[in-house]
Amino acid sequence: MELVNTHCHSRYCGHGVGEVAAYADAAAAAGLTTLAFTEHFPLSHAFDPDGYLSVPVADMPAYLAAVEQARRDHPGMEIICGCEMDYLAADEDRVLSAADLAPFELILGSVHFVDAWPFDDPAQRGAWDEPGAPDRIWRRYAEVWCQAAADPAQPFHVMSHPDLAKKFGFYPSFDRAPLYEAMAEAAAAGGRMVEVNTSGSYYACAEMFPAPALLAAFCRAGVPCTVGTDAHDPANVARDIERGYALMAQAGYRCVTVPTRSGDRREVPLA
Ligand SMILES: [Zn+2]
Ligand SMILES: [Zn+2]
């Protein structure tokens, strides 16, 4: 069946490697029909003083031009110009206008920060060892994620890596099922898609995002699901896409939903 990837990064963010062209070439070689570039939308200097987490503002025109060029080089593949946008809740310090968002055909909504703290940054891993930290962080993470997913004022099309809080392999002492139900309700209320993000298998949590039980909750709530590899290296542009489809099928999905350049969605049966 068709292979699609709706989430990848490049050397334009400080922690990715590889040119946009190299991702497009690798995707074409792997036979992808849709590839979305979703570079990290610029954060303020306060959140990203070294330009490590996101694309520096000054580099955005070059990123957009590189995506345009990739499109000309690969007319047979749908190349979507997107971005991954951090949800910062009350700590938001950027003023985003419609013009800032206009270049993007796909916007991923991501929670990498709770209360301005980057909980999934490897440099912050030690904080998870504090007594009670996993319970506290998971509760707050789910709360912030639900706000982001349900808020109609946010521009997000897809909510990325829904249970990113598990990245380092820390889990709360309580049953996560009620959080999963709340997250599914929030995504449905906001009309969002979610993604199976295949990169999770390569972190300490050793499974894709989201967990099977959370994905099943999204399916029951009627939340459409797409697949992204979250590649930060061209070598991973097609990594585990078929395994992502299998996870979706096990969770009850019959189709993978694929966003299009026009802002529409199309469905590909999970045969
Ligand atoms: Zn992310
Ligand atoms: Zn990403």
Image (cartoon, rainbow, N blue to C red):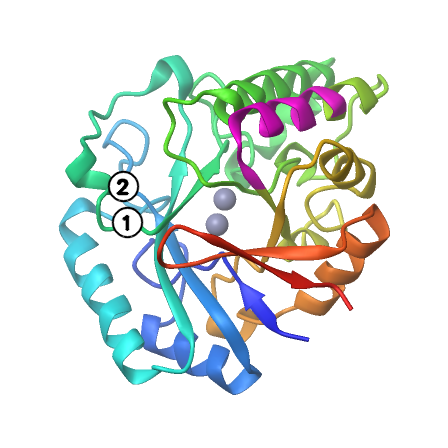
Residue 71 in the image, given as x and y percentages of width and height = 30, 75
Q: Nearer the viewer, residue 71 or 110?
A: 71
Q: Whole-percent x and y of residue 36?
A: 43, 61
Q: Give the numbered dot on residue 212.
A: none
- Residue 21 picture quarter: bottom left
Q: Which residues are magenta?
A: 181-193
Task: From the image, tell me which residue sits under label 1.
Answer: 55
Mark 2 secondary-structure assignment: loop
- Residue at image location 71% in from the left, 51% down from the top: 208
Q: Is residue 240 visible?
A: no
Quarter that holds the C terminus:
bottom right
**In-front residue for pair 71/120:** 71
Indicate the secondary structure of the residue bearing disc 1.
loop
Q: Give the alpha-carbon distance from disc 2 to disc 1, as whole Å.
A: 5 Å
Disc 1 residue type? Val
Quarter occupied by residue 77: bottom left
Q: Relative to residue 152, is residue 5 depicted above or below?
A: below
Q: Is residue 93 above or below residue 9?
A: above
Q: Which amino acid does the dot numbered 2 rest on?
A: Pro
Going from N to C along the chain, the mark reached first, 2 or 1, is: 2
- Residue under the point 73% across and 16% down: 135
In percent of width and height, residue 268 lies at: 64, 63
Residue name at image x 37 percent, y 33 percent: 155
Crowd tier of the residue under label 1, counting other residues whose Cα lies within 10 Å: few below 14, some 14–19, many 20 or above: many
Direction from residue 239 to residue 59 in the image, left or right? left
- Name the residue beneath numbered marker 2: 42
* Tag 2 and tag 1, C-beta contact below 8 Å: yes
